Image (cartoon, rainbow, N blue to C red):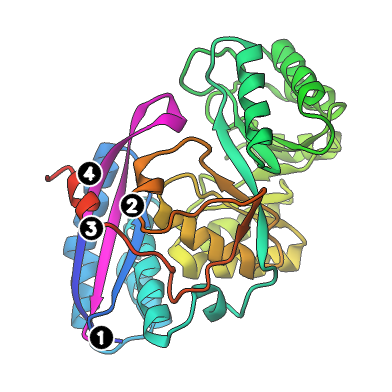
């Protein structure tokens, strides 16, 4: 396909799923010579990173694609990666060309009249379990437990709990209370509801504390523990993996296919968190998924942003033999519910594959412009 126009925006929106805090992201819009429009997202998040991501789309990768003439998605991916060899082995460049790669897949799928999961080889499952991805941020244990019970009553198959996040809770800051919380939560939701624990960012555990805490939580059935140490502490993750009978999830802060191959080779984890809005796009996710197959690891699309990345993550997840769930925001937010004409929702705890061409979403461009920092 030939690209005629590329636009980008930095979006800013309040998120009820993040204690009402403002969140930012970057959108890319690609228009082909045939008038097909594709959308992509680079989840740069911080204001300065979002501005830098937009600049790279507008002044580096965008012009590169416009000058390329007829080009395939695979050729465009290689072209963008090669262009940023000096400054882009990970980091902000990945946000920029992840967004463009996603948009190119969307446009290509529409051009061919096929959903992205079909371009990826077809779905391995028609639907995937929906998990509420929630920050534990209410002031008391009971309020946080009641919230999760509400997710179960709403039909979710499980929950992923972000510890030590912004808010009023001390969950993630007191290991003894963390164990009590998981114990009481399990009593409240029963045995048929999966609990995943995301200890990333705010939790400060040494190895001994992590082993003791995770072993205690394991008695109440947690599905995995995510990044309990800083991601570069591979020896600590590996030691924890050897000491506990709970899968270790990692990867949310990796950027490139090469990064994930190194992580897999380290044998430090069982679950790979791979976000197509930062890890070299849909093309990068697909390659990492192949590595996961060879290593027998689980893939988890970290889709906690807008409906654009959620759609990409859904296509990738149903087409992967290694994905077991899809994370959804449990509380309404405009970039999920109003951004697209048909929001991606679960039904009785399942999210169905999208069979419309490309990403299969119709983006509300007026809302994009309203949320843009330039509006």
Q: Where does residue 144 sit, x and y in percent of width and height?
A: 61, 19
Crowd tier of the residue under label 1, counting other residues whose Cα lies within 10 Å: few below 14, some 14–19, many 20 or above? some
Q: CA distance from mark 3 to mark 1?
A: 22 Å
Looking at the image, how many numbered discs can be counted on the residues? 4
Residue ID for mark 2: 339
First-in-chain label (4 vs 3): 3
Residue ID for mark 3: 365
Depth order, front residue of 257/96: 96
Crowd tier of the residue under label 2, counting other residues whose Cα lies within 10 Å: few below 14, some 14–19, many 20 or above? many
Q: CA distance from mark 4 to mark 3?
A: 10 Å
Q: Where does residue 365 sit, x and y in percent of width and height?
A: 23, 58
First-in-chain label (1 vs 4): 1
**Relative to 227, does residue 289 appear above or below in the rendering?**
below
First-in-chain label (4 vs 2): 2
Residue placed at 36% from the left, 46% from the top? 335
Q: CA distance from mark 1 to mark 4?
A: 29 Å
First-in-chain label (3 vs 1): 1
Crowd tier of the residue under label 3, counting other residues whose Cα lies within 10 Å: few below 14, some 14–19, many 20 or above? few
Residue 2 is labelled as: 1
* Badge 3 vs badge 1, beta-carbon distance below 8 Å: no
* Badge 3 vs badge 2, beta-carbon distance below 8 Å: no
Magenta stretch, main secondary structure class: strand
Q: Is residue 15 magenta?
A: yes
Depth order, front residue of 206/350: 350
Residue placed at 63% from the left, 44% from the top? 131
Q: CA distance from mark 1 to mark 2?
A: 27 Å
Determine if residue 294 is in view.
yes
Q: Residue furthest left?
A: 375
Q: Tag 4, which secondary structure?
A: helix
Determine if residue 256 is in view.
no
- Residue segment shown in magenta: 9-34
First-in-chain label (1 vs 2): 1
């Amino acid at each position: 396909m030939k690209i005629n126009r590329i636009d980008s925006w930095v979006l800013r929106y309040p998120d009820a799923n993040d204690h009402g805090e403002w969140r930012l992201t970057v959108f890319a819009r690609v228009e082909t010579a045939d008038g097909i429009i594709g959308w992509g997202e680079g989840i740069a998040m911080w204001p300065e990173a979002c501005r830098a991501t937009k600049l790279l789309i507008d002044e580096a990768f965008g012009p590169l694609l416009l000058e390329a003439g007829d080009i395939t998605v695979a050729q465009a991916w290689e072209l963008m990666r090669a262009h940023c060899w000096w400054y882009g082995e990970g980091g902000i460049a990945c946000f920029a060309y992840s967004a463009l790669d996603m948009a190119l897949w969307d446009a290509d799928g529409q051009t061919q009249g096929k959903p992205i999961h079909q371009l990826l080889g077809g779905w391995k499952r028609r639907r995937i379990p929906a998990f509420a991805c929630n920050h534990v941020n209410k002031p008391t244990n009971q309020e946080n437990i009641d919230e999760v019970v509400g997710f179960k009553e709403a039909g979710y198959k499980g929950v992923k709990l972000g510890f030590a996040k912004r808010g009023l809770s001390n969950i993630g800051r007191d290991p003894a209370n963390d164990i009590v919380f998981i114990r009481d939560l399990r009593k409240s939701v029963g045995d048929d509801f999966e609990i995943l624990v995301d200890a990333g960012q705010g939790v400060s555990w040494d190895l001994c504390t992590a082993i003791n805490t995770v072993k205690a939580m394991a008695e109440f059935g947690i599905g995995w523990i995510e990044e309990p140490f800083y991601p570069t502490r591979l020896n600590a993750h590996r030691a924890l993996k050897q000491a506990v009978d709970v899968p270790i999830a990692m990867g949310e802060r990796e950027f490139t296919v090469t990064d994930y191959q190194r992580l897999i080779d380290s044998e430090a984890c069982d679950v790979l968190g791979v976000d197509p809005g930062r890890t070299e796009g849909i093309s990068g996710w697909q390659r990492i998924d192949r590595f996961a197959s060879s290593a027998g690891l689980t893939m988890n699309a970290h889709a906690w942003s807008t409906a654009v990345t959620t759609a990409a993550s859904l296509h990738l997840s149903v087409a992967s033999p290694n994905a077991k769930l899809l994370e959804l925001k449990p509380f309404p937010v405009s970039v999920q519910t109003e951004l697209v004409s048909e929001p991606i929702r679960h039904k009785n705890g399942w999210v169905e594959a999208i069979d419309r061409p490309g990403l299969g979403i119709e983006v509300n461009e007026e809302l994009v412009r309203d949320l843009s920092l330039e509006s």
